[in-house]
Image (cartoon, grey):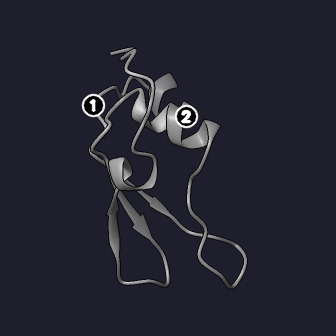
Amino acid sequence: MFKAVSEGFRQIKSIAITPTLDKQVFPYGACSQVLAEFNQNMKIYIDKSNKVYDLSDLIPNVFNNKLY
């Protein structure tokens, strides 16, 4: 996320998370809050699970201070 922002990307619609371990990994806590600063309804694609999540489903009560 930080690399994308440093390269000038601000309107981020989705992100794919690919773990290095053999299990599903989800963004929670501070990581989710950073994602929410750019799009509270971002689509989260989790590798090895054929599911797509809305960020708002994973962290429903984010702070509402949008940066961009």
Mark 2 vs mark 1: in front: 1
Residue 36 vertical placement versus 59 (above, below): above
Quadrant into which the C terminus falls: top left
Q: How many marks?
A: 2
Residue at 61% x, 68% y is 25
Q: Is residue 9 left or right of residue 13?
A: right
Position of residue 15 measured from the top left corner of the image (x, y, whole percent): 40, 53
Amino acid carrying mark 2 in the image: Lys
Dot 2 or dot 1: first in sequence order is 2
Give the label on residue 64, or none.
Answer: none
- Where does the image place residue 13, in percent across and percent down from the top left? 26, 44
Real-space Cα separation, disc 2 to disc 1, in angstroms:
14 Å
- Furthest residue toward right: 21
Give how far across and how far down residue 21 sits, in percent.
73, 78
Element at label 1: loop
Q: Position of residue 6 (x, y in %)?
A: 51, 23
Residue at numbered disc 1? 11
Front residue (pair 13, 63): 63
Question: Residue 36's quadrant in the figure?
Answer: top left
Amino acid found under the numbered disc labelled 1: Gln
Q: Give residue 3's mark.
A: 2
